[in-house]
Amino acid sequence: MESYDEDWTDSQRALYDECYRAGGEWADDPDTPSEDVQHVINLGEADDDTLLDAEIDYPPLVDAVAQATGENVTSVPASHDDPGFRGFVDGARDATADEVFGL
């Protein structure tokens, strides 16, 4: 389910939407290894204290943000406050069936 921070701007919401779609398509792609999907789900389940505002250079996530923003990015903040990160992991999780990975 798509979820925005109430203080996000329209452009942040649009970034979330684009990354949400990309995360869902990526997770639903039969060529995406299940271990990779599990990795992204684990990132989405981690709290921000665990992530410690690190930068993630995970290619599918970086590609989704780069495509959504039209900018060349090499990493994405690992934070649920970041619309690109949250959109991608939410989309991947929502595209994964509940019985997969014990969700």
Image (cartoon, rainbow, N blue to C red):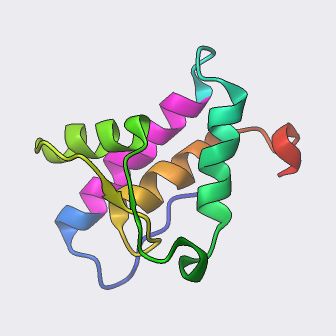
Q: Main secondary structure of the magenta part?
A: helix
Q: What is the total number of numbered labels drawn onto the structure image? A: 0
Residue 53 lies left or right of residue 93; in this view the side is left
Residue drawn 55% across the image and 54% down it: 90
Residue 77 sits in quarter: bottom left
Vertical relation: 37 (above or below) 1 = above
Residue drawn 83% across the image and 43% down it: 101
Residue 76 in the image, given as x and y percentages of width and height: 32, 56
Q: Residue furthest left?
A: 71
Residue 70 lies left or right of residue 10; in this view the side is left
**In this orientation, which residue lies closer to the viewer: 89 or 59?**
59
Residue 98 in the image, given as x and y percentages of width and height: 82, 45
**In this orientation, which residue lies closer to the viewer: 29 or 54?**
54
Quick check: is 21 in the magenta stretch? yes
Q: Which residues are magenta?
A: 13-27
Q: Residue furthest top?
A: 31
Q: Quadrant of the N terminus?
A: bottom right
Vertical relation: 99 (above or below) 34 = below
Residue drawn 64% across the image and 68% down it: 46
Residue 63 in the image, given as x and y percentages of width and height: 31, 36
Residue 40 in the image, given as x and y percentages of width and height: 59, 47
Quick check: is 1 in the magenta stretch? no
Residue drawn 54% across the image and 78% down it: 48
Residue 39 lies left or right of residue 88; in this view the side is right
